Image: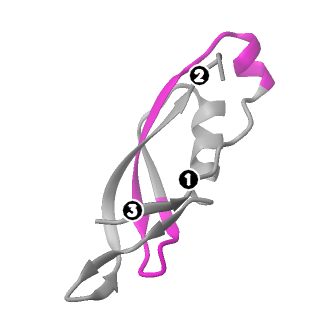
Amino acid sequence: APRLKREFKAPYPEASRSAGIEGTVVMKLTIDENGRVTHVRIIRGINEELDTITKSAARKLLFKPGMVDDKPVITTGYVMRYTWELNE
């Protein structure tokens, strides 16, 4: 299974912050053999603004790719959670 090498934390959007909206976005990722995210699908979202920003942030993550027979492979359906908390 892929392992996260580089995280990316997006800035909290002001509209959601001032509305007190927080929570966790659950998504499925496709990660290529170079560890880059090539596809993001939101499974459980919060609102349109945070979901859109989460998708963009996920594309900036970098993983150590999954391996089969010591060769890097494309991984589909990798489930990841991205949490938005107001106290950060």
Q: Is residue 52 or residue 67 the one in the foreground? A: 67
Pointer 3 residue: 3
Q: How many angstroms separate mark 1 from mark 2 (CA)?
A: 17 Å
Disc number at residue 5?
none
Q: Amino acid at mark 1?
A: Ala
**Residue 88 placement (x, y as % from top left):** 66, 23
Which quadrant of the figure contains the N terminus? bottom left
Residue contact between numbered discs 1 and 2, judged by CB atoms under 8 Å: no
Of pointers 2 and 3, the one earlier in the residue sequence: 3
Q: Is residue 6 above or below residue 14?
A: below
Residue bearing the label numbered 2: 85
User: In terms of sequence position, does the residue under pointer 1 or pointer 3 come before the other?
Assistant: 3
Query: How far, Cα to Cα, is label 2 from label 3?
Result: 23 Å
Query: Residue 34's spot in the image, x, y percent?
Result: 48, 80
Q: Position of residue 27 (x, y in %)?
A: 41, 45
Amino acid type of the residue that numbered disc 2 sits on in the rendered structure: Glu
- Residue at 72% x, 30% y is 12
Residue at (57% x, 37% y) in the render: 51
Residue 24 inside the magenta-drawn segment: yes
Q: Residue furthest left?
A: 69
Please state which amino acid type lies under the numbered disc 3: Arg
Q: Is residue 4 left or right of residue 14?
A: left
Q: Secondary structure at mark 1?
A: helix
Label 2 sits on a secondary structure element that is: loop
What span is in magenta? 14-39
Dot 1 corresponds to which residue?
58
